[in-house]
Image (cartoon, rainbow, N blue to C red):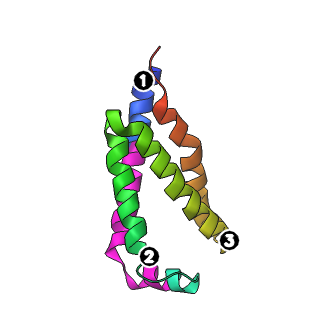
Amino acid sequence: MHASSASIATAYTLSLAFAVAGAVQLSGTDAIQRAYVRWGYPARASRIAGALELLAAALLAMSAARPIGVALAAMVNFVAVVVLLKNRAYLLALPGLAVTVALPFTLLQNT
């Protein structure tokens, strides 16, 4: 597998992950809203997080906008991981740490 096809596969996989996470956040279920409130954030903050995750997913899926998508995804992911670690949700933070490792691979070019 070439670096280019691996980076494209990584970008699409991360795009799907951010799209699913964004859809879950936007659904605003009671469990999600309770978690935000328990952690000291407004219940509706999940809508903002969901919208940013969906935007990151869309940008990651477009090769011309991928660097911007990586930057946005990295910021959203960083905040999510910090909030989870701050609230001692260590196992929930593990996928975010994996995303942190995978994001730079989406920028690899075939040389």
Q: Name the residue that disc number 3 marks.
A: 86
The local crowd at label 3, few if under 14, some if 14 to 19, many if 20 or more residues have their Cα within 10 Å, is few
Q: Amino acid at mark 2?
A: Ala
Residue 45, label in figure:
2
Q: Amino acid at mark 1?
A: Ser
Residue 105, label in figure:
none
Q: x and y percent of residue 48 in the render? A: 40, 69
Residue at 39% over, 35% down: 9
| The residue stretch that appears in magenta | 13-34
Q: x and y percent of residue 84 in the render? A: 61, 68
Residue 17 lies, with reference to residue 40, above or below; the image says above
* The N terminus, quarter of image: top left
Name the foreground residue: 53 vs 90.
53
Q: x and y percent of residue 96 in the render? A: 56, 56
Does the magenta portion include 78?
Answer: no
Residue 48 lies, with reference to residue 3, above or below; the image says below
Does the magenta portion include 33?
Answer: yes
Q: Amino acid at mark 3?
A: Lys
For the stretch drawn in magenta, what is the main secondary structure? helix
Q: Name the residue that disc number 1 marks.
A: 4
For the residues labelled 1 and 2, the Cα–Cα distance comes to 36 Å
Task: Indicate the secondary structure of the residue bearing disc 2.
Answer: helix
Please state if 99 lies on the left or on the right of 110 as rendered.
Answer: right
For the residues labelled 3 and 2, the Cα–Cα distance comes to 17 Å
